[in-house]
Amino acid sequence: MSETIRPATIDDAPALGALHVACWREAYAGHLSAEFLARETPESSAERWVRTITRVVGEGGAPPLLAELDGALLGFAMGGPARLEKAPRDTELYALYTRASTHGSGLGQRLLDAAIGGRPAFLGVLDRNPRATAFYERNGFRFDGTTAILPEFENQIERRMVR
């Protein structure tokens, strides 16, 4: 039994979609409504991942990285060039999620290291996600005062962290 971190391919989209939805539901239960969390399905997420992987690879970028143990996906991360015109850093962490069963195992750290290493970077984190905030702070990220209200995410507040 060995864990691997590898680039995702189009063939991974169904499993990645299921993983993404499961991680969202675990991470945001109690913060977002059950109705909101139920709207996202593994199939709709998989369709988005097909488009994302196709676009990113077509542009010469890196696809998401998958953490896998004995054929089961446990987490994913994706980073790359900043998507904002006036970004505080050249590198952005787009996403990092792991299954709740892996919390405290170091998997999130391994994914972060594989996705962006120790480079100066920035990311957005929901205001009501203290576990993620603490993780990013341990990795040198600090809030820079930039916030956004996300209407498409039940008006959650996203705060920017930079290192």
Image (cartoon, rainbow, N blue to C red):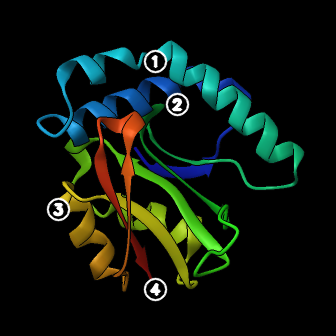
- Count of numbered marks: 4
Q: Name the residue under label 1.
A: 42
Task: Provide residue 92's location: percent of width, then percent of height.
Answer: 58, 67
Helix, strand or loop for disc 1: helix
Mark identifier at residue 16:
2
Dot 1: within a 10 Å radius of its alpha carbon, few (fewer than 14), some, or many (20 or more) residues?
some
Could you tell me how far apart the alpha carbons at marks 2 and 3 are, in whole angstroms?
24 Å
**Nearer the viewer's eye, disc 1 or disc 3?**
3
> Which residue shows up at 53% across the image and 17% down it?
44
Task: Provide residue 40's location: percent of width, then percent of height.
Answer: 40, 20
Q: Considering only order in the chain, which callout, 4 or 3, is on the residue closer to the N terminus? A: 3
Which amino acid is tagged 3? Pro
Helix, strand or loop for disc 2: helix
Could you tell me how far apart the alpha carbons at marks 1 and 2 are, in whole angstroms?
8 Å
Q: Name the residue under label 3.
A: 130
Could you tell me how far apart the alpha carbons at marks 3 and 4 are, in whole angstroms?
18 Å
Helix, strand or loop for disc 4: loop
**Nearer the viewer's eye, disc 1 or disc 2?**
1
> Which residue shows up at 67% across the image and 78% down it?
90
Q: From the viewer's perspective, is 161 left or right of 56?
A: left
Could you tell me how far apart the alpha carbons at marks 2 and 4 are, in whole angstroms?
28 Å
Which amino acid is tagged 1? Pro
Mark identifier at residue 163:
4
Q: Considering only order in the chain, which callout, 2 or 1, is on the residue closer to the N terminus? A: 2
> Which residue shows up at 44% across the image and 49% down it?
2
Whether pointer 3 and pointer 4 mark residues with C-beta atoms closer than 8 Å, the reply is: no
Q: Considering only order in the chain, which callout, 3 or 2, is on the residue closer to the N terminus? A: 2
Could you tell me how far apart the alpha carbons at marks 4 and 1 are, in whole angstroms?
33 Å
Task: Provide residue 154's location: percent of width, then percent of height.
Answer: 29, 35
